[in-house]
């Protein structure tokens, strides 16, 4: 605030002088530009199918997903009495029982003083933060539903001798063997008859760094000579599209251990709806409220189509 110094009051009948300004006025200028904000890459939309997304509307709903049963094949001999089977398989329940929300207030005073559409900017930020929160939630909780033959020290539905790491015995990955582990995960999926097209692997930053230091230094050898895209896509190795994520599941056990997942979108289902986005006047202050609710559910619908490497750098 500027400082004003007044002279002593003159004798009666004298004139009152103008106030003497002695301070320096420094105005505040609010820029119309915003510092760019960079968000973590999100991968869920690339690794999961959303086949049932259009069938949900409300939190708490359950989507019944039907599966193809196994038809029994029996050897035939002449004059044999044919046996009758009735193929059936239990439906998989996709529960829409997760949700995240945001609720922000724009004070009227702020709105008057701002030349930026604050609510629009906050809505954009909320959208990105929701993606990050959902990615983290899913990647933290799918490992329990992966088929037993697709993880652990004896992985492989046929071979049973592929070591992908186990509790208290994580595999140590370095630049020399990093490609070997990717190929091993490919073999695990091969032994489960998982299609080669559409496979993915989600890796942490240190894992990606080791790949770049390995014999596969040239990005073009991975089938993609472009830089990392917005969804963290790195390229392809052994039929896998590689995605980088800072939200892979970690465990603190004599150092940090990582759950590196690979699979096919057939194995992981995700459904989400942004059910509410609304603005309203606040009751206890002079402000406009903006809030939104996203509900979602996820399920490993086929545990044979996802595998896991438990490792550390």
Image (cartoon, helix red, strand yellow):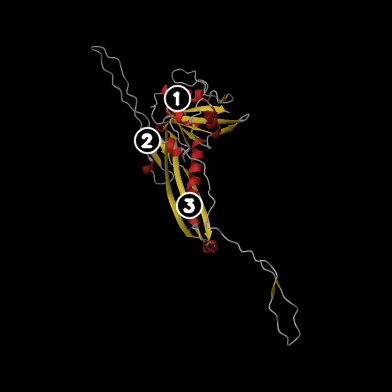
Q: Residue at x 34, y 25 (%)?
A: 70
The mark total stands at: 3
Tell me residue 283's x, y (percent): 52, 61
Disc ID at residue 186: 1
The quarter of the rendered structure image containing the C terminus is: top right
Tell me residue 199's x, y (percent): 42, 30
Assess whether mark 1 and mark 2 are in contact (beta carbons under 8 angstroms): no
In front: 292, or 255? 255
Classify mark 3: helix, strand or loop.
helix
Mark pair 3, 1: CA separation: 40 Å
Q: Residue at x 41, y 33 (%)?
A: 265
Q: Residue at x 45, y 24 (%)?
A: 186
In front: 196, or 88? 196
In front: 26, or 161? 26
Disc ID at residue 313: none
Q: Give neighbour class at mark 3: few <14, some 14-19, many 20+ (Cα, 10 Å).
A: some
Mark pair 2, 1: CA separation: 27 Å
Disc ID at residue 123: 3
Q: From what the image shows, is residue 5 above or below residue 113?
A: below
Tell me residue 263's x, y (percent): 44, 30
Mark pair 3, 2: CA separation: 33 Å
């Amino acid at each position: 605030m500027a400082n004003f110094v007044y002279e002593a009051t003159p004798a009666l009948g004298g004139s009152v002088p103008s106030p003497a300004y002695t301070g320096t006025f420094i105005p505040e200028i609010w820029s119309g530009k915003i510092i760019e904000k960079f968000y973590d890459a999100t991968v869920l939309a690339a690794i999961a199918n959303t086949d049932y997304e259009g069938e949900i509307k409300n939190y708490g709903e359950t989507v019944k997903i039907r599966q193809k049963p196994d038809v029994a094949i029996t050897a035939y001999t002449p004059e044999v009495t044919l046996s009758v089977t009735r193929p059936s398989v239990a439906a998989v329940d996709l529960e829409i029982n997760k949700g995240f929300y945001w609720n922000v207030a724009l004070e009227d005073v702020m709105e008057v003083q701002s030349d930026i559409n604050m609510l629009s900017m906050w809505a954009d930020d909320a959208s990105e933060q929701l993606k990050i929160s959902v990615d983290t939630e899913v990647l933290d909780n799918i490992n329990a539903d992966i088929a037993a033959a697709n993880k652990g020290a004896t992985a492989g539905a046929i071979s049973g001798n592929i070591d992908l790491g186990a509790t208290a015995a994580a595999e140590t990955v370095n630049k020399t063997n990093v490609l070997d582990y990717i190929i091993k995960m490919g073999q695990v999926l091969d032994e489960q008859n998982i299609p080669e097209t559409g496979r993915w692997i989600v890796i942490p930053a240190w894992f990606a760094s080791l790949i770049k230091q390995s014999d596969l230094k040239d990005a073009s050898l991975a089938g993609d000579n472009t830089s990392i895209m917005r969804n963290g896509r790195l390229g392809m190795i052994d039929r896998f599209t590689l995605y980088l994520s800072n939200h892979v599941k970690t465990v603190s056990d004599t150092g940090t251990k990582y759950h590196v997942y690979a699979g096919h979108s057939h194995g992981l289902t995700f459904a989400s709806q942004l059910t509410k986005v609304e603005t309203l006047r606040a009751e206890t202050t002079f402000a406009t409220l903006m809030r939104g609710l996203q509900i979602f559910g996820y399920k490993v619908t086929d545990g044979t189509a996802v595998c896991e490497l438990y490792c550390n750098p």
